[in-house]
Amino acid sequence: MDRFNFINPFGVRYQPDTVAGDFYTNNFAKKAESNTIILNLGPQHPSTHGVLRVIVELDGEYVLRAEPVLGYLHRMHEKMGEVKTPWQFLPNMGRVDYLHPIAWNWVHVGAVERLAGITVPERAEYLRVISCELNRVASHLMWWGAFVMDLGGVTPILYAFEEREKINDILQIVSGSRLTISYFRFGGVSADADDRFLRLTAEFVPYLRQRLKMYQALVTDNIILRRRLEKVGPIGVDMCQRYGATGPVLRAAGLNRDTRRDIPYSVYPKFDFNIPTGPVDDCLGRYLVRLAEIEASLSIIEQALESLPAGPILPPKAPKPTFKLPAGESYFAVEGARGQIGLHLISDGGKTPYRVKLRAPGFSNLSLFAEAARGTLLADAIAILGSLDLVIPEVDR
């Protein structure tokens, strides 16, 4: 077929100077006014932190419309979960969200354990909490550094990488990995914590608390940053609920919701921790909530280390790689760095699941961007996009 005579699904005919993929822009332009500009952000653009494309219509520097275009990084994780055994699919979870892979580990093993009736030893539950909260801190720090870099400040991301390397050194002891971590197993974890892991974790908590004070003075209290974020991109509770936004985006809007408390799992009910909310629903509010969540995670880690019980890290009859899921279905949810992560698992009793459905918080959070960016300056739209803490592999799945 002659591609120049091909009519795409939007009814727009390709022209000789058209490149593949421009039918999105053409369709968008059909609705544009004559004195406006259509601009593509991405799919390779530093402010998108991945392969995300956003088409915007501008009147001068003001955003009239914005439309995220997904699919550039789609890898069919759900389909792979339906053609692989649970054991074979487990490493996939670390690749859905490379900044908080342990949370995705947890949602998968949790759904399998709930369906198969597998009991997790208490020590393994504590190690899951410690590793997941360490990973959450690393994720928030990377967001902090990258977000400030989007706004023009380069120095903070160097500090963020320094702290993240310390966390990776700790997690590598038990998991053997530094990025796409696959530490959890059905019924427990892959390795026990040794004295070095416990010592380095205990030393890291007060160290980071001191560093957070420095970040407060260096970045958070900086008048330039505050003027850049205050009253920019307000996202209220109503907008969050209409699009299904969760996590820091929802809590910054003032709604106190956290899966660790509201849908309790593991040993989280044993810990006393603060769930930061508000006080403002703009970009600055989302910034402040995430920094406060780092302190909350440090508190959980500290409590878990103090009360870490002895015992096994796997049940006496741990599932073998050849085990089959019983027929039935289960749903398991955890609190990830970007919001509620969920996995709906349906089994017909065969070697592989009948259906695997992943609930990615980044997808819901991104969905509200078109409404939140409308009427803002383009530079403020970039700040709004960054404040959502997007990880594009998770959005596309």
Image: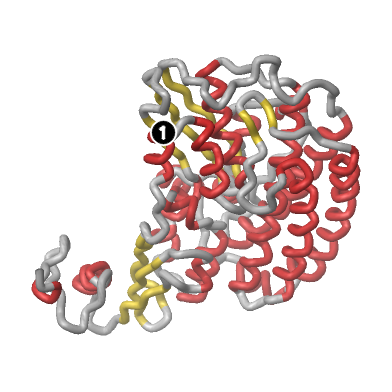
Q: Which residue is mark 1?
A: 356
176 or 120, which is in the foreground? Answer: 176
Quarter of image, res 10? bottom left
236 or 266, which is in the foreground? Answer: 266
Q: Secondary structure at mark 1?
A: strand
Is residue 256 visible in the rendered image? The answer is yes
- Say left or right for 360 vs 309: left
Q: What residue occupies the far front of the structure in this picture? A: 322
- Say left or right for 345 vs 25: right
Quarter of image, res 15? bottom left
Residue drawn at (74%, 25%), measured in percent from left and top?
313
Residue drawn at (79%, 70%), measured in percent from left and top?
218
Residue drawn at (76%, 59%), measured in percent from left and top?
165
From the viewer's perspective, is residue 381 above or below residue 91? Answer: below
Is residue 239 visible in the rendered image? The answer is no
From the viewer's perspective, is residue 111 above or below residue 296? Answer: above
From the viewer's perspective, is residue 209 above or below residue 324? Answer: below
Percent of width and height locating residue 392: 48, 57
